[in-house]
Image (spheres, rainbow, N blue to C red):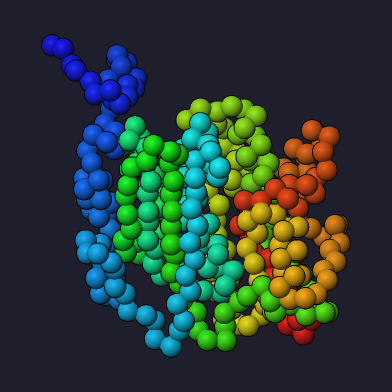
Amino acid sequence: MTVRLKPDTTLRDAPGGPLVPTLTVADIGERALIARIKARMSMPSWVVIGPGDDAAVIRPERGAFDVLTTDALVEGVHFDRRFVPPHAIGHRALAVNLSDLAAMGASPRAALLSLVLPPSLDVTDFEQLVDGVLAVAATYQVTLIGGNITQTSGPLTVDITAIGSAKPRKILTRAGARPGDEVYVTGALGEAAVGLQKLQLAGLSGHEGPADSCVTRYLRPQPRVRAGMLLGRNRAASSCMDVSDGLADCVRQVAEASDVGVTLDANTIPIPVEVRQAQERRGQDPLEPALSGGDDYELFFTVRPAHR
């Protein structure tokens, strides 16, 4: 029997067998892709109109403001599919948006997912990417209420709009720091940058390689949602920002927004042993990944001395 393949059909090794054709997103079309996402979704009572109409309608949380943020991950700019698996792409896409909500002290509620897909993308990779988004959504009780799918001749792009809620007077911003405030950060810094370096140097293809805390930290960051909510609810932080582009960037932006200067003691910056060892092996400064590496998604915040 002769199998005639479409020009954009890809081939993949079958376990113990010859190359077999795999479905691409172009093969099954937009409606079938949307149906595959909708089959995994459920709607809470505050979603008045969910996926399937021209727009979603949700009921706002009583006595709270809506907090909205959006962020896009573009292949070749924010991730490399040679060593970032589809599930991790989806995980990161939602996690970075939830980190922004956490920095505002907001409780996450809903998200809109927009996918710009190359026609040659495997359907299996598409489903794993969506699974990564939905796994993070389930962990943080986020409802996927709609979105869009389109094809492109350019790079794979995952664009998410996340919606949260926060009570008045409990929303955190970058502009509240005052002279005398103390500076804090959740967790530790620099692991994600070192993890990315390890992936790039190893030249991995399609898998994550051996278990490694730095690699895991880059591939699957954990947004500090609970910490952000508590800082907002307790009005403990005078300013707050998520650490997406390194500690130095946070210092600059909070200082500018608050019209203050910030002094850091290098000895107090929390840097894991794995980061120090990796940098020392390369003959590089252990502080560098923490200051400018990015992708940690911790929270940088300031606190009045009385609220220590």
Q: Please determine whether, in this image, residue 186 is positioned above or below residue 83.
A: below
Q: Quadrant of residue 169?
A: bottom right
Which residue occupies 33% across, 42% down? 151
Q: Quadrant of residue 2?
A: top left
Q: Is residue 177 left or right of residue 111?
A: right
User: Residue lying farthest front?
Assistant: 153
Q: Residue 144: image x %, image y %?
A: 34, 61
The residue nearer to you, when weighing 300 against 152, is: 152
Q: Quadrant of residue 306?
A: bottom right
Q: Please determine whether, in this image, residue 24 is positioned above or below residue 108.
A: above
Whether residue 158 is visible here, answered yes or no, is yes
Which residue occupies 71% across, 62% down? 250
Q: Residue 131: image x %, image y %?
A: 36, 48
Q: Residue 278: image x %, image y %?
A: 75, 37
Which residue occupies 59% across, 27% down? 203
The residue nearer to you, when weighing 274 against 284, is: 284
The residue nearer to you, when weighing 157 against 303, is: 157
Q: Residue 264: image x %, image y %?
A: 84, 63
Which residue occupies 83% across, 79% down? 180
The residue nearer to you, when weighing 205 against 188, is: 205
Q: Please determine whether, in this image, residue 142 is positioned above or below residue 21.
A: below
User: Residue lying farthest top?
Assistant: 1
Q: Is residue 160 left or right of residue 52?
A: right
Whether residue 213 is visible here, answered yes or no, is no
Quadrant in the picture for the N terminus: top left
